[in-house]
Image: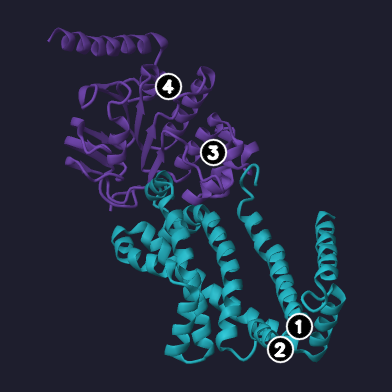
Amino acid sequence: MKPGYPGGGPVRLEVDITSKEYKNAAGERHDVLADIRFALGAGEVGVFVGPSGCGKSTMLRIFAGLDHDYQGRVSRPAGARIGMVFQEPRLLPWRSVEDNVRLAAPLANEVKLSALFAILELNAHRNHFPGELSLGLARRVALARAFAVEPDFLILDEPLASLDEALAARLREQIAMLVDGRSVMTLLVTHDVDDAVRLGDRVFLLSPRPARVLANLPIPTPRSARGEAEIAAIKADIARRINGDRTERDAS
Amino acid sequence: MPRLLSFTVFVATWWIASLLAGDAKLPPPPAVLAAMIAEARSGALFLNLGATLARVALAFVLAMSLGSAIGYLMGRVRLANRIGDPWLILLLNLPALVVIVLAYIWAGLTEAAAITAIAVNKLPTAVVTLREGTRALDAALDEMATVFAIPRWRAFRHVVLPQLAPYVAAAARSGLSLVWKIVLVAELLGRPNGVGFEIGVAFQLFDIPLLLAYSLSFAAVVLVIETSLVQPFEARLSRWRPRAA
């Protein structure tokens, strides 16, 4: 057994999906994913950037082991603890904030939980029910739940979507702090290039549906050391690639 | 206070109606109260109420637990639903009287036959309600429980059961009223005690005060159980809702 990992084996995600079809209620088949191939190691934050509706959430469901109906191969670290933030908070409305977190993470001790609640500024809301929370707060509870399980594999599906800019920036910092605090393999999906460049170690650009990986861009500078100039340069590069692809397609 | 008022109006209406219809058809409240006290003094009232309550409790528990389990299964597993559905439709539409008479014929005039017959009458409504509840379960929360590897039993208790609770409460509520109605018929037809049996006797003797004494005591017991047990239970289940109806 390798150290630091209860399930044994290396913490590494290897994905080679050749296609994924989706059948809608009318029985029509749609291709959602075309060619998704990449690998991610422990401690790496991989960020997927792609247009809305390109199949990002479908992809994450496959990585999380919720969907087995696809062509190709996904090797997840067996027995890895998964922490996931869904696009909607998916909290249990009949349990308090604290109980929601504890249900997913029964082994979390009080000290770590307190620290987590403090980072996410949730201490005042421990005994509230999710129905009493704003969306921003509910998203933070969902983040707390995902981090409380001390995951080996963290999946974040647009955790900052539809939040105002200031709150999104604060939450982004909090996510960065939590990810850096533990060496965890992280996958983040977003359509915000800024989030991608500030959080990712590796940015994957996705095409419109059916999604395939257009580019795999490593960002070697550590998150905390990235200056605004470098971030702007990477963003410009990404924008060029996305738009370049678009003009290419428009031309053909 | 509003409850007291509504009770007063009930007694007043009854009294006026008895003056209009005559003692023979509708005895006034004091006559019924006297019959009630006489039955209570002899101990017969409590014995019969107790016998009926015991049958209600057994049949209710049996039908609720079996019905909930079958309903959950039929809601979750397509095959179970296809196998069970014709039986469900048959049982739903089978008159209570048929079930009771057949139970007495096949199992004799026994306690087991009575309780089974009552339970069988209530069972299908519990199945239907719980099946609907199970179909309405939120798949998104199931996925959450799967991803976080919450053990089956814990997920059932914290994720599934709270979603089913309103349906269980609805099944309990409608089922209890059904059981209250059917238990008396079962007792009338084949038991030597219980409220239903006494009402049958009173009917044959045309003893209307006795008949009303048992009917009203029974109604009072039902009311007490509904307000002291069923309603607080429902309120507790929905306490997390910001504004419970």
Dot 3 crowding, Cα within 10 Å, few <14, some 14–19, many 20+: many
Mark 3 vs mark 1: same chain? no
**Amino acid carrying mark 3 in the image:** Leu
Mark 4 vs mark 1: same chain? no
Dot 4 crowding, Cα within 10 Å, few <14, some 14–19, many 20+: few
Whether residue A29 appears in this view of the structure is yes
- How far apart marks 2 and 1 lie (CA) works out to 10 Å
**Amino acid carrying mark 2 in the image:** Leu
Q: Chain of mark 4?
A: A
Helix, strand or loop status at disc 1? helix
Say which residue label 1 marks: B210
Say which residue label 3 marks: A116
Helix, strand or loop status at disc 3? helix
- How far apart marks 3 and 2 lie (CA) works out to 76 Å
User: Which of the chains is cyan?
Assistant: B
Picture quadrant of residue A52: top left
Q: Which x, y percent locates residue A11?
A: 28, 43
Q: Residue at horizontal 45%, vertical 46%?
A: A149
**Amino acid carrying mark 1 in the image:** Leu
Q: Observer-nearest residue: A33 or B115?
A: B115
Which colour scheme appears in the figure? by chain
Q: Circles 2 and 1: CB distance less than 8 Å?
A: yes
Q: Chain of mark 3?
A: A
Helix, strand or loop status at disc 4? helix
Picture quadrant of residue B192: bottom right
Mark 3 vs mark 4: same chain? yes
Say which residue label 4 marks: A224
Give the colour in which the image draws chain A.
purple
Say which residue label 2 marks: B205
